Image (cartoon, helix red, strand yellow):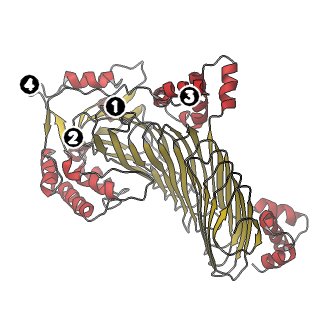
Amino acid sequence: MGHGHYIAPPAGQYQVKAGEKLELQFVVLPGESRDIELGIDLVGPGAEAHIKALYLCRADEKVNFRIVMHHRAAGCKSTQLINGIAGGQAQVHFDGTIVVAPDAQQTEAYQENHNIVLTPEAKVETKPQLEIYADDVKCSHGATVGQLNPDELFYMRSRGIPEAEARMLQMLSFLSPVIPAGREEEMEAAVRSL
Amino acid sequence: MSEDKKIIQQFTSGEYKEGFVTDVEQEFIPKGLNEEIVRLISARKEEPEWLLEFRLDALRKWQAMPQPHWAHLDMPEIDFQDIIYFAAPKKDKDRPKEIDPKLAETFDKLGIPLQERDVLAGVVAVDAVFDSVSVTTTFRKTLAEKGIIFCSFSEAVKEHPDLVRKYLASVVPASDNYFAALNSAVFSDGSFCYIPKGVRCPMELSSYFRINAKGTGQFERTLIVADEDSYVSYMEGCTAPMRDEQQLHAAVVEIVVEKGADVKYSTVQNWYPGDADGKGGILNLVTKRGICKGDGSHLSWTQVETGSAITWKYPSTILKGDYSSSEFYSVAVTNNHQQADTGTKMIHLGRGTRSRIVSKGISAGVSQNSYRGLVRMGKNAQNARNYSQCDSLLIGSRCGAHTFPDIQSQNPSATVEHEATTSKISEDQLFYCNQRGIGPEDAVGLIVNGYAREVLSRLPMEFAVEAQKLLQVSLEGSVG
């Protein structure tokens, strides 16, 4: 396994060699409980890995992400963007670690996990972690857990957009950075079902 | 580049100025930890029965617990039977009311005035703890006029047993964790502070902890109670002699903040960090926790951590009262072989509670510096809000910087934001300063101080100057 572009890829171990580029995209639709466990080793100089994932929960789904991004060589780049919406009594758990080995200088590693909680019964736990043993690095992570912005909702409603439609638009725009190309309509239908 | 390296070297190899030993006659109890030792400590301090029971109960709990290993630390095996749990300077029988001049001299050397004279130097009331006992507490009378109780823990047990009994272990129960249980069993002295309803404490209160004796550990306990609508600013400082052996410091700090009260707790931790090869130093294993019990209460933690071979410390707040708020501002510097695993916990229980975390880690040499934090939004934390920012600065290619946040949300109206970055002092920044005539060492100092400014500016004035200097000294010789 090495380079390529996967949509709905198998979870598991990936090794990315010098100059190769790995792109993974995960979509977890309402009603699906998934455990996504990923171990990605960037072993050659200049290797790249990019992960995008989205999840939508409306009932009692359990979605777990466990991602370890290991930068073992110099000059590698990785990005991770995981956005999702939790409704119903869903339980979402995100556990992501970026490890930068002592000799992996000139590393660039970014990780983001954003969550929207719709109901009081839904539970979100996020643990973005950085373990860095090299100094010439640019690493950052960010995580948020929140709700749909009431100001945005008000803005749209004051311009005649019905509440349900406005909420759907908000959720779609929240997800848009991680929606796979060509699957926009399917996602819209999924969001409407929440 | 090699020039830079040299400068960094010089910059991070500063000496530990507080590393001297005071030659004073001391009494010790035998080494080891068992029921008899606990009874001995309790008898030595003439404690009431309930406190002895509390200690024995904690000891039994401690004996049943395993030592935790989840922290990102390479912790040496601690032989708890090889530690002296109580050491006190002998009192001169002829003048028991006065402080031993040698002790006064020690604290003077450390810049802690034990006489109530330095009015111009900023008025600070000090409780000075030397090994296992409190040496003196200044400005007690002035404070008593306002109804404020500020004294050593032992005195508080004798003079205000009801207050101590009511609040002791109400925030950190004896069974909370391994080191809190150990402390509960053998704690020696510490500070007690009670601010009555509606009183604004007129001066900064401060505790100063000094480890002096060899082969001992320090186990102090601090209890701060701020009654309704009161205000207090509390500072804590500490140092220890330079030794090849590692010494244990396991303290517990409990803070109770009632309705509408405001507490500001600042720490400048400067225990002996060990030498450049990682020999010796203090193992700083501390449990600090406050509870914002009443509505609208506020607790603010500020810490500057530069010392200790190993730091294991998570000052936390339980936000129970509605619309209560808390902040955590931290600068943690590690150099040489130091290891730090520090951060905070914000437990949001009440409605509209707010918290803010700003953590700045700086690692140099071959040190490891970790931020570990927990933000929990409980079911009833309607509209609760948290913002966390954790930045790491790496100086040199052999150190490590880590971030381990944990965010748990059970409320759809709560908002949590966390962001973290890791970077180094870039050659561009150094070049820019050099080009304008700022020497490399000053440039690093400037950059680090700028980086930590947001936290340093929160310190009380008396501490801020010291902290800035300390940052510079701690990093001496690390530029590269």
Classify B144 as above or below B292. Answer: above
Instruction: Please state the chain letter of the residue tagged with numbered disc 1 in the rendered image.
Output: B
Q: Which of marks 4 and 2 is nearer the N terminus?
A: 4
Measured Cα–Cα span from mark 3 to mark 4: 57 Å
Q: Position of residue B21 (x, y in %)?
A: 25, 27
Q: How far apart are marks 1 and 2 (CA)?
A: 26 Å
Which one is earlier in the sequence, the residue at label 4 or at label 1?
4
Kindly indicate whether the residue at mark 1 contacts the one at mark 4 (C-beta within 8 angstroms). no
Disc 4 from disc 2: Cα separation: 29 Å
- The residue lying at 36 percent from left, 48 percent from top is B285
Q: Position of residue B224 (x, y in %)?
A: 37, 45
> Which residue is label 1 attached to?
B126
Q: What element carries label 2?
A: loop
> How much space separates mark 4 and mark 1, taking CA atoms?
25 Å
At label 4, counting other C-alpha atoms closer than 10 Å, the crowd grade (few under 14, some 14-19, many 20 or more) is few
Q: Residue at x 19, y 48 (%)?
A: B82
Q: Are marks 3 and 4 in contact (CB under 8 Å)?
A: no
Instruction: First in sequence, mark 1 or 2: give its number.
Output: 1
B280 to A24, vertically: above or below: above
Count of number-bearing discs: 4
Q: Residue B5 carries which label?
A: 3
- Residue B299, visible in the rendered structure: no
Q: Name the residue under label 4.
A: B94
Q: In this rendering, would B127 be left or right of B371?
A: left
Residue located beneath label 2 in the image: B215
Q: Nearer the viewer, mark 2 or mark 3?
A: 3
Q: Which amino acid does label 3 sit on?
A: Lys
Looking at the picture, which amino acid does disc 1 mark? Val
Quick one: quadrant of the N terminus of chain B? top right
Q: Badge 3, how many Cα within 10 Å: few under 14, some, many 20+?
A: some
Q: Would you place residue B453 above or below residue A70 in this image?
A: above
